[in-house]
Amino acid sequence: MESNVQFVKTLLKYTFGLVPIVAGLDKFTNILTNWSQYLSDGMAAMLPFEPSVFMMIVGVIEVVAGVLLFTKTQFGAYLVSLWLVLIALTLILIGSYLDVAVRDIVMAIGAFSLAKLTEVKTNN
């Protein structure tokens, strides 16, 4: 049982560590998608700079969250979970990309689960 718990913890750690880092870095290249499309027109209009600059700031936050997850797993997992919930709430409030919002809530639950699993003491 302990080896299964350790396997799940390791799998979740790499998943929720790498995904924010990759998504964060992609905010600078837009290879995966044009990230600015996820901002509502109203939110983009409120920014004192271009939406792409805002997304680069978001990218830095995501990279830091991913690195924190690798170095301080429990804290980083809670941070990634919170970040994903905030993204989902933002999408829900603007009323678009609701499918992405649902996916992010599910991912937040996974990151939260990793944080809780790090509280479980194993012999490994």
Image (cartoon, rainbow, N blue to C red):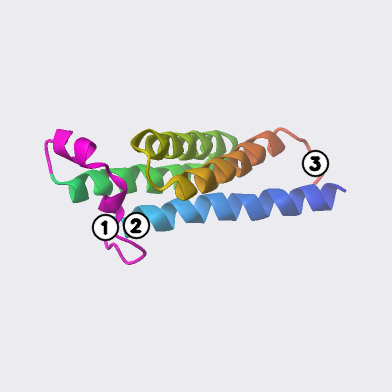
**Side (left or right) of 86 relative to 60:** right
Q: CA distance from mark 3 to mark 2?
A: 34 Å
Task: Name the residue that disc number 1 marks.
Answer: 28
Q: Residue at x 47, y 40 (%)?
A: 84
Q: Nearer the viewer, residue 91 or 56?
A: 91
Q: Is residue 44 magenta?
A: yes
Mark 1 residue crowding within 10 angstroms, few (<14) / some (14–19) / many (20+): some
Quick check: marks 2 and 1 in contact, CB under 8 Å?
A: yes
Q: Amino acid at mark 2?
A: Leu
Q: Residue at x 75, y 50 (%)?
A: 6
Q: Amino acid at mark 3?
A: Thr
Look at the numbered disc 2 and give the secondary structure of its residue: helix
Residue 72 point in image, percent of width and height: 54, 39
Look at the numbered disc 3 and give the secondary structure of its residue: loop
Task: Name the residue that disc number 3 marks.
Answer: 122
Q: Which residues are magenta?
A: 28-49
**Side (left or right) of 70 relative to 4:** left
